[in-house]
Amino acid sequence: MRIIETVWIPLSDGCRLAARLWLPDESSPVPAILEYLPYRRRDRHRGDDAVLHPGLAGCGYAALRVDMRGAGDSDGLMNDEYTLQEWRDACEVIAWIAAQDWCSGSVGLIGISWSGFNALQIAALRPPALKAIVTACSTDDRYADDMHYMGGALLNDNLQYGATLFTWTPTPPDPAIVGDRWKAMWLARLNAMDLPPAARWMQHPQRDDYWRSGSVCEDYGRITVPVLAVGGWADGYTNTVLRLLENLRGPRKGLIGPWGHAFPHIATPGPRIDFIGYVQRWFDQWLKGRETGIMAEPMLTYWQQRPEPPRARYVQRQGHWAAERRWPSADVRAHTLHLAPGRLQDTPAQFTATLSSPATTGLASGEWCPYGWGPDMPGDQREDDAGSLCFDGPPVATALQLLGRAEVRLELCADNPLAMLAVRLNAVAPDGTAIRVSYGLLNLAARNGFDRAEPLVPGHYYQINVLLKAAAFVLPAGYRLRVALSTCYWPLAAPLPVRPVLTVQRGSVILPLRDPDAEVCPPPALGDPWSPPPVPARVLVAPARGRQRVIRDMDDGETTLEVVRNLGAVELAETGLRLEALGREIYRVNAHDPAGARSEAWRSAGFHRGDWQARLEIHSLLTADAGGWRLESTLDAWDGEEPCFSRRWRLDFPFFSPPGDEPA
């Protein structure tokens, strides 16, 4: 294998993109597989690249990792995600790759998270040389299924991921690659940060044209190349896999494991699989024209989870592999249970029940997007159930298999124009342990559609539908199902400054149950996991991620959650660079009065080689009052020990405003 550290890809406007290239030991041209994202091939993403792209090259493909315009060592500027410029550049990159003498003319895209998103978006543009894609942990709907909003409710992930992107977007290029231009390029990137990313996303609290752009669900028919969609039940983006299988019309496969936000050969919780081998079969079929048998296998392969004691971190999940010949599956049928006082039953009931959850309800939620290698999974739900309105079914006589998305329908009213609802579907073990199977959120101002925000009329009853996240779960005999309703889900959802009282008078839950008598579809063999060797590095600060510590003031009811989000500090042998990437968050709320709640994020990134040092630090604070959200952010940068850039923002975002209004 031959590795070329820096390949320059020229674009039509004179901009050049920096790429790293792995070439297999082949005498004739080979197909190419591209991953295209902004996460710095020379340092931040080097470890991730090391465990994927050499493996693809070993399978007989030219593998390329291209840094987008304005990222890493590439020319130009960027200040937002998923832009027209990003996609146009990608189409030029694909055409350039196809024209190289080492390429056969066929190109595939592979990606996870950002590069999984844009794999779908680029495929919708139909560049001629693109023959197939692999998209992992991605979304087809940027508003409904990304870390900004869920059911129209603002997520605290908008703040924390916004802080991460805020840090890495304006980082400097490597002087070893771009020479003396590095400082001018860096300052241009810093000055291009006109808004913190979290603020840009908060300018669009409804599903408007900003979110529709790049949401391939707007027109699935634009994607005609074969699509392999990959996800994990622990990940934040699982819904996408099932929607793509249902709505795409070209060749497609879905693979969902127990994994967090990572490729399946390195993901936790396990079991891991031979993902590189699986991807090779996919691309061999479509880029090399070899019959691999993969299209004769079931459309959907998934991990069927079984209950186990809930923990914040798992090494392996209990369950087994299963498959469906097609999706949607004719063997999955809707089954309705109705809410009655404290219980679930087969017949409709009318009742009156009120709830106003303590503002700390949600501490057992886990993260919106667990990565699996820190304490970030949902725990025992009994603590959150104590602050919720719960409806329990009887112990089931025979096992139930849930597969798909449950839906909860309610008739309710509120005493406040502003309110949200969290709905959880739990499995309750015979010993009382409560395991979260799925959940959903709804900003009740978005009850009539995510393209509008309409205040509630206090005392008026509304019909409310909440769609829960996709799941595959076996409820054993003797277990009970529980529907739990709460008026907050802190800190996963950013807390509203009020504690509304909701009154429920009718409701039902629609469960996607697989027919126990249906024929079992055997899953394909997925192989044993393997990975190319990790990047040579000396670890100075170990990576750490997840919810580390909860502090409760027993006198005044204030609760503080401390979160760490460190990529760590390493010395990279191949580039001679020392990289520091550290982050943390602190979330505070009073259980009795959420008006003073604070969500804060800190990030820093440092680059060191010899006498060269560059560093960035950011801080963001989210609060709310009766009128809306307030975001305060700072961005500071140093060249060595000398400050070279500083900017401050203080922005307000009203809860209710006409579409198109900009923040003050």
Image (cartoon, rainbow, N blue to C red):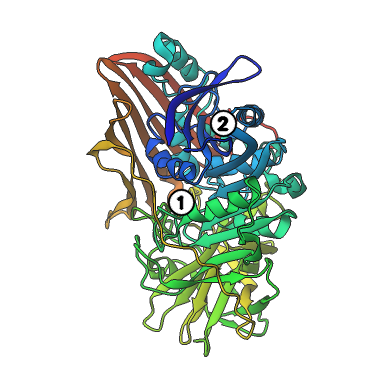
Return the mark for residue 547.
none
Amino acid type, mark 2: Trp
Q: Left or right? Give the position of 90 relative to 379.
A: right
Amino acid type, mark 1: His
Callout 1 environment at 10 Å: few (<14), some (14 to 19), or many (20+)?
many
According to the picture, the residue beneath numbered tag 1 turns out to be 261
Q: Residue at x 72, y 46 (%)?
A: 223
Residue 129 x %, y %: 68, 36
Q: Left or right? Give the position of 399 relative to 212.
A: left
Q: Front-most of 375 and 251?
A: 251
Q: Is any atom of residue 237 visible in this view? A: no
Query: Which element type, helix, strand or loop, lies under badge 2?
Result: loop
According to the picture, the residue beneath numbered tag 2 turns out to be 102
What is the C-alpha distance between the residues marked 2 and 1?
Answer: 33 Å
Residue 71 x %, y %: 49, 26
**Mark 2 or 1, nearer chain start:** 2
Q: Front-most of 128 and 41?
A: 128
